[in-house]
Image: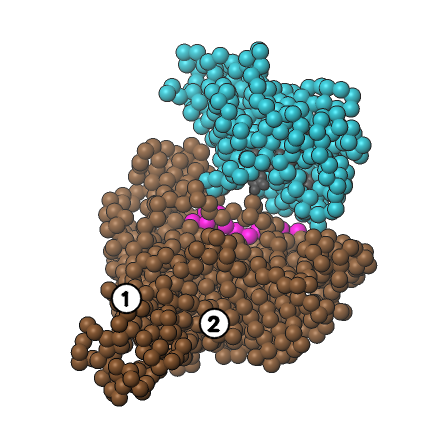
Chain colours: A cyan, B brown
Amino acid sequence: MKIFELTRADDPRQAIAAAAKANTAQQGADIRFIAGGTNLVDYMKLNVETPRQLVDVNHLPFDKIEALPDGGLSIGAVVRNSDLAYHPIVRKNYAVLSEALLSGASPQLRNMATTAGNLLQRTRCMYFRDTAMPCNKREPGSGCAAITGVNRGLAILGTSEHCIASNPSDMNVALAALEATIHISGPKGERSVTIGDFHLLPGNTPNRETVLEPGDLITHVTLPPPSPGNRSLYLKLRDRASFEFALASAAVVITADGGKITRARVALGGVGTKPWRSMEAEGELTGQSATQAVFQKAAEAALRDAKPQSQNGFKVELAKRCLVHALKLVTQTA
Amino acid sequence: MPTTQEIPTASPIGRGTPRIDGPLKVSGAAHYASDFHFPELLYAVPVEATIANGKIRQLDTAAAEKMPGVRAIFHRKNIGKIFRSSAGKGNEGICIERRPAFEDDVVRYYGQYVALAVADTFESAKAAADAVVVTYAKEKPNVEFKLTADHDPDTVETSYGPEKRVQSERGDAAAAFASAPVKLDQTYVTPAETHVPIELQGTTAMWDGDHLTVYEESQAIFNLRSVLAQMFGLPYENVRVITKFVGSGFGSKLWPWTHCPLAVAAARQLGKPVKLVLGRKMTFQAAGHRAHTQQRLRLGATPEGKLVSLQQDYVYERSMLEEYHENCGEATSFHYSVPNLRVHFGRARRNIGTPSDMRGPGAVPGLYATESAMNELADQLKLDLVQFRILNEPKIDEGEGIPFSSRHYVECLQLGAEKFGWSKRNPDVGSMKRDGLTLGWGVAGAAWIATRDDAAANVELRDDGSVRVACGVQDIGTGTYTVLALLTADKTGVPVEKVEVVLGDTMLPHGPVSGGSWATASVVPAVFAAADNAMTALLNAATTTPGSPFENRKQDDLAFKGGRVFVKADGPGGGVPFADLLKRADLRLVTGSGRSEGIFGSKAKPKFSMHSYGCHFAEVTWQPEIARLRVSRVVTVIDGGRIINPLAGRNQIEGAVVMGIGMALLEHTTYDPQNGAPINSNLADYIVAVNADVPKLEVHFLDYPDLELNAIGARGIGEIGLAGIAAAITAATNHATGVRVRELPIRIEDLLKSSVLA
Ligand SMILES: Cc1cc2nc3c(=O)[nH]c(=O)nc-3n(C[C@H](O)[C@H](O)[C@H](O)COP(=O)(O)OP(=O)(O)OC[C@H]3O[C@@H](n4cnc5c(N)ncnc54)[C@H](O)[C@@H]3O)c2cc1C
Ligand code: SF4
């Protein structure tokens, strides 16, 4: 870990002004916000992140979960993952989000982790974590050790020849299925970005992970009102029973009417370089009956463009089974 | 007369006794090796090589040296002399990685220490270590997964002395196999596994002139003392090693690793105490691991299921310089009756950190392979897995041609089968269901050597009615403190609460290693002898003190039981508490010493074959829709001699089964094919079983004393519980899914091939 300065922001303008001086908001940022610190501090200890200044955002007034007039929900950037998971409105209207959060990490970590921190948590690619290894995300142009090395846990969707790192977050997958919007306050004012546009594909610049610019502060995340009569669910598959990132996961939000699916939102985790919304799967489901055959078609569609690496070919089949099973469970009449 | 002791109703041995050190541990008052602080203590952080093969070309320490708080950056040129060490008899001078750090500029494995930063704080030392710039002449490392044996002579040197590569042979195994009516020829692979004890390895070293004190979480303090005396050219008695508590070792703390002498050398060079605690990543690189093994098993049998031939040819990886022997044939020669047998091994050098003992070394990977082969052959023969084993039960140890001291393997299998409900097993793959899940049932046997190391102990009877027992053995979390209290209480009749136990210091009488599951068996005779001698001293005082109720009595007429002395002829009803006798004689205490010779490594041919036995019955559930396999039930039966403390004993077996679930389904250290780093070197990527992976575990002990081993017939049970469990789980997995996994761990990739789809 490199020596750094820690300052505490008491109002958002102060935080934005401090971070606006950063060289970038992506890999290599010299100024970083710190929230729960459960991801950032890890990487600072490994010298993967070497900010000279940390701006503590934990005291900003973004710690509330509020029902919106339109029936949606606003979630503050520093709301702890556990508070969010157990919030009555979340449990009632957005079960998929609660389940995704609770499937992640451990209770201790969830008590620290925040909404914005979780959105921005970085890949678990083992080469990214080790500064002695080549890694295009950490050090552009140095190569990708994972493509020719250990890549069992990495992505099969949205990869590029420069990077195949998977987005590790469970929460993000639920947010993708819920069509969340990220609200940002920056040096140039406020703006909002849909979850689908927030994370970037690696392409030629895997070091760029989001649309954030220096000084951009996430203030809150909003969810649209739940579609009436919907049921949602998160299913996570991994090697051990708990405390592990997903090999494959599925977030599904389904509205069915008399056995017919009228609306479907599907996102996959553990397999994409970003939280992977699958409109292809949604297209196969919408207007169809909730049958195994339809689910299978949706799964095939979702994984059609998968590009397996030397070790993670099994994820194609695993993700399919995950999605099919999630759809089966969510459409089962109780 | 006031009594200071109560007569306990019965011996505490065999009664479940909570750990006497429990309160210290849960209140944070138990001091582990790196919890000790000293004035002027400095902190050391090693610089790890970032190549696995090559040479250090240049080491630039200039920037690091100038950093705040930095005292020194050590490397080959300025660390001072560190000698090599050599093994003596038994457990003296054992060091698996003999090459002292910095001995030359060659890098042979990833993470090898190439320099050492020492500073006023840990943070400064770490920052300085990170700032050392090392340039290498890099060569491609050999971490090839598939193992082909190197050219080796018929007898090879190993860390434990010479070993014949044909380890055991009888009859003509090849010919018998060739003509066997039923055959099995399969290869089983176990990956490198890392111990990952929660407490990290570390050393705090302190010099006082030419006297050295080291706080180390060691499983063998006397061995470490002898190694350090050699490495620093010191008289043996000038080295003191202290290990009060160990946060598990699983073998990784048995023998010294290269960081320990580095801390000692740095303390010497700087004239100040130095603490060096490894980071988790370093423990994957340079603090041992279970060697990756590849074992070809060839079994031949009659159609009725009688084994006629067994061949085990195994290859294991070793590091570039060292000769650690992973003895996969440990249990093969005696476990089943078979007239023709050959066990043979080879070794393959790799650019990896040196493998070492890990819980049940040799036998655990060995039994995984042999028990898996037994299960496969039974299936081929269409025989019940339990019956097939019973059919091949030997009458004597056919490898050594000697009788067993105490073997109840068949009873283990029978009891386990009954407790598990094995008779309800339908052998057809995928045929058993519960709650919408497919069940798989499997079984495997276990064996682990029972032996004794040298041990000495001292017992003091004190005038306040308490007893102190001291022994330089270590409690590695297994309950050794409590075992010594129970043994002493048993012998002297003093209640357990009145026994003070002192361990973990080379100032104390020479204790055994806490490894090989020998510690308990080894301390029994030493503690008993010490207690006997202390009691004799007490009787001496009782018969010679003027005014003593027993003055001028013959010692032989007296007895010492239940903490009281009485005349044998009068029976135990009356008698005098020993504390009263001490007071009358104006003695604060009397003391007795005891020692016992070890039998391990002795050249004399043993009269008996001594082992613990056991078996595991495992159930898995299979949910093909999501390729999810979980262990849902395990019943374990252990024939581990007399169980001194069933509470701690059960805990050992349960812990081993949990580790076995990890071995079967999760654990593997993966070497990066490009640069040779153990790449999953942290606890998020090196997956071990968590609570949610652990089902209901049932443990039964047969409790037959093995009186050939010691007076109460106690063996150790730290390792036996891990033997066989992986084979039971792979058998259960095959039963549920039809997928035969012969390379651990069982992965989702394997299970996706299952044709059991609902
Ligand atoms: C052992 C372990 C296991 C885990 N397992 C899982 C798992 O199974 N599933 C899962 O989903 N996650 C898992 N996690 C990850 C965990 O969810 C994240 O670490 C956590 O969500 C990060 O939140 P934080 O508040 O601590 O972020 P921090 O570490 O504080 O910050 C992360 C990043 O977000 C930035 N940031 C923080 N707040 C803001 C803001 N308001 N505006 C702009 N930028 C901001 C920081 O600058 C930093 O770059 C695990 C973590 C650990 C350590
Ligand atoms: S996959 Fe991406 S993060 Fe991993 S090594 Fe390659 S470039 Fe780096």
**Residue at the (62%, 58%) spot, across then down:** B277
**Residue at the (66%, 66%) spot, across then down:** B273
B681 sits to left or right of B293: right
Tell me the crowding category of disc 1: few under 14, some 14 to 19, or many 20 or more residues within 10 angstroms, Cα based: some
**Residue at the (46%, 26%) spot, across then down:** A326
Amino acid tagged 1? Glu
Disc 1 residue lies near ligand 1 with CB under 8 A: no
Q: Is residue A35 visible?
A: yes
Tell me the crowding category of disc 2: few under 14, some 14 to 19, or many 20 or more residues within 10 angstroms, Cα based: many
Placement of B326 over or under B533, stated as above or below: above
Q: Give whichever of B637, B41 is nearer the camera.
A: B41
The range drawn in magenta is B661-674
Q: Toward which corner of the image does residue B378 lie, by quadrant? A: bottom left
User: Where, quadrant-wise, is the C terminus of chain B in this rendering?
Assistant: top left
- Percent x, y for residue B308? 32, 64
Q: Is residue B336 visible?
A: no
- Percent x, y for residue B201? 57, 60
Return the mark for residue B408: none
Query: Would residue B673 be counted in the magenta stretch?
Result: yes
Q: Are marks 2 and 1 on the same chain?
A: yes
Quarter of image, ligand 1: top right
Return the mark for residue B472: 2
Tag 2's secondary structure? Answer: loop
Query: Would residue B293 be counted in the magenta stretch?
Result: no
- Tag 1 residue: B6
